[in-house]
Amino acid sequence: MQYGMNLLLWTDTLSEDTLPLLEKLKEIGYDAVELPMFDVNPGNYAPWKDRLEGMGLKCTGVTVRGGESNPMSSDPKERKQGVADNKAAVECCQAAGAEMLVGPFHSGLGVFSGQGPTKDEWKWAVEGMQEVAEHAEKCGVTLALEYLNRFECYLLNTAADTARFCKDVNHPRCQAMYDTFHSHIEEKNVTEAVKALKGQLVHVHISENDRSTPGKGNVRWDETFDALKAIGYDGMMTVEAFGVALEKLIPATKIWRRMYDTEEQLARDALAFMKAEVAKRW
């Protein structure tokens, strides 16, 4: 098993100020970091490949799409922009040395129609992702699609949705990820949710029900780790936690109170928690 930390607890932009943070996460014991890729300019990520390799850190990339770049929009221009931005995010991964792009980039974050996805929306999303997957193959990047709870998107809300979507895309570079926060809201049975992704699961977000320190809340952790072991998962487990450091993320995360002592302590406690749970089973 490998362990990663999503940088969105601290920043959504890489800069020279990020270097001490990366060094600290390596010192704590993390194997990888998850890089925010909201500015989809590959040139901004190229310098980080050597820096991360020099520290002995692997990386994954995380991105989202919005209303003007929604891959399942009824507006062909928005769909085209969504596919183009997803391809650019794939190129950002390639530039940074990340072999995986994760996130809910299948549809527009926070965009709603007032009903579930139509047949056309599903078809447009599948066709767009097929094009992105072909590009990802050329770049040596694997897509790990994340389903979100119903308050954040309406295309993919469950593991079963995601498994069906990946099956419809039908490309080896289009796979699935599992986030314990969203599962806690949407799934009736954690074990069955994880099993639904068997053979497609390539990435896991370890995230508490209140988005703070994993292991300190109400997520069904025993069932989660037991199920991951049962399907033979042995990939990356990445902590995704949010706080109050990024003011512009607060409207999206709905977090405006500190629920941990410090970001560093959260990172330390989360890593210890993951390693302890894995040691019990693997």
Image (cartoon, rainbow, N blue to C red):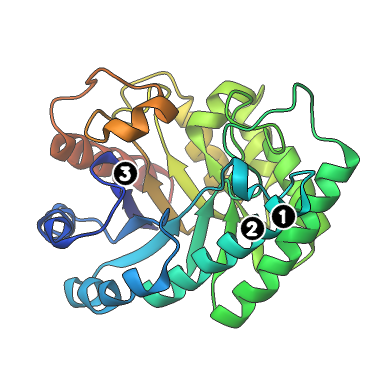
Q: Report whether residue 242 is seen.
A: no
Mark in front: 2 vs 3:
2
Q: Amino acid at mark 2?
A: Gln
Q: Are marks 1 and 3 in contact (CB under 8 Å)?
A: no
Mark in front: 1 vs 3:
1
* Residue, disc 3: 8
Crowd class of label 1 (few under 14; some 14 to 19; many from 20; radius 10 Å)? few
Q: What is the spatial separation of the Cα atoms under label 2 and label 3, in whole angstroms? A: 24 Å
Task: Determine the image quadrant of residue 210.
Answer: top left
Q: What is the spatial separation of the Cα atoms under label 2 and label 1, in whole angstroms? A: 6 Å
Image x and y of residue 218, in percent: 42, 18
For residue 257, above or below residue 237: above
Q: Amino acid at mark 3?
A: Leu
Give 153 or 174, whichever is nearer the viewer.
153
Q: Are marks 2 and 1 in contact (CB under 8 Å)?
A: yes
Q: How many marks?
A: 3
For residue 224, above or below residue 90: above
Q: Amino acid at mark 1?
A: Lys
Q: Residue furthest right?
A: 119
For the residue labelled by badge 1, is the local secondary structure a helix, a strand or a loop? helix
Instruction: Please indicate whether residue 49 sits to the left or right of residue 80 in the image.
Output: left
Task: Determine the image quadrant of residue 151.
Answer: top right
Q: Residue furthest bottom?
A: 138
Q: What label does residue 77 carry, if any?
A: 1
Q: What is the spatial separation of the Cα atoms under label 1 and label 3, in whole angstroms? A: 30 Å
Image x and y of residue 176, in percent: 62, 52
Q: Residue at x 63, y 77 (%)?
A: 137
Q: Residue at x 79, y 28 (%)?
A: 116
* Residue, disc 2: 81
Q: Report whether residue 252 is seen.
A: yes
